[in-house]
Each structure stands twice: as structure tokens, then as C-alpha cells.
Amino acid sequence: MKRDAFRILQATETVIYLFAGFLIAGGAAVLLVSSLVEGIHHLVAGDYGEVALGLLDRVLLALMLAEILYTLLRFAREGTLEPTPFLIIGIIAAVRRVLVLTAEAVERFDLQDPAFIAVLAELGLLGLMVVAFALAIRLVRPSGVP
């Protein structure tokens, strides 16, 4: 009786992870296709900065979704959860924010604008986060693994 209940729960867990994986994969596909369509629209309109910023933002978001999907699949297959993929997601998210914030700040801010200091502070904190995530990856990896 316990074994049957355990098997049912394991199968349910696998179905949930697979369903979540399909949703994430579908979301990433829709995100990339909509980015392409929107990018073409801005390109035709001559908004080259919007094309670059939009594509950069959405492609990095799609990479984050791909890393989450990888983590889900690996957990469903092996039954173990490792911190490294989450740290990689954190690095991608921080780099994404740095790139988008920098691109937006170039167009929006003046050096005399007080909000520019806030942007610089955020960029500094994001830089520290990337370093912290990289150090955390180094610490959680077993010795001898590149």
C-alpha cells in the first residue's frame, strides 16, 4: 500500500515538473517570436536603439527561462537539486539588468541629473552581485571541476 502511494506521488511529481517545463518552454518560444516581430516592427520604424534594447532584454530573459527549464528537467530526471543553475540564473539576471539599465541611462540621464547617482549605485550593487554569484559558484563546485 505504501509503495503504491509512493509511486503515485512520484509519478504526480514528474507530471508536474514536465508540465511546468512545457509551460516554460512555450513561454520562452512565445517570448522569442514576439521579440522578433517587435524587433522587425521597430527596425522598419527606424528605432534602432529600441531594437537592440528589446532584443537584448528578451533574449537574456529567454536564456534565464532555458536555465530554469534545464534545472527542472535535471531535478525530474535525477531527483537532486543543485545550487549552481540558480546561481547562473542570478548572474544572467544581474547582467541583463546591467545592460538594460545602462542602455536606458544613456538616453535618459544627464550627468547633472540626481537620478543618475541612483543608477550608478544600482549598477555598483549589480556588479557586486555578479561577483558574489561567481564566488558562490566557485565555492559550491567540487574541487577539480572546471
Image (cartoon, rainbow, N blue to C red):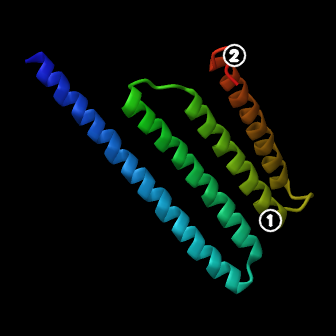
Q: Amino acid at mark 1?
A: Arg
Q: Nearer the viewer, mark 2 or mark 1?
A: 2
In the image, residue 113 lies at what x, y percent?
87, 58
The answer to which image quadrant residue 110 occupies is bottom right
Q: Pick whichever, 95 or 113, lies toward us.
A: 95
Would residue 56 be found to the left or right of residue 118 on screen? left
In the image, residue 137 lies at what x, y percent?
66, 25
Instruction: Kindly indicate whether the residue at mark 1 contacts the one at mark 2 (C-beta within 8 angstroms).
Output: no
Name the mark on residue 144: 2
| Residue at image point 39% right, 46% down | 21
Q: Earlier in the sequence, mark 2 or mark 1?
A: 1
Q: Which residue is mark 1?
A: 108
Question: Looking at the picture, does residue 56 appear above or below residue 49?
Answer: above
Characterize the local packing of mark 2: few (<14), some (14-19) or many (20 or more) Cα atoms within 10 angstroms.
few
SS at mark 1 in the image: helix
Q: Amino acid at mark 2?
A: Gly
Name the mark on residue 8: none
Would residue 3 be found to the left or right of residue 123 on screen? left
| Residue at image point 18% right, 22% down | 6
| Residue at image point 92% right, 58% down | 112
Q: Give the residue at the far top of this rendering.
A: 143
SS at mark 2 in the image: loop
* Quarter of the N terminus within the rendering: top left
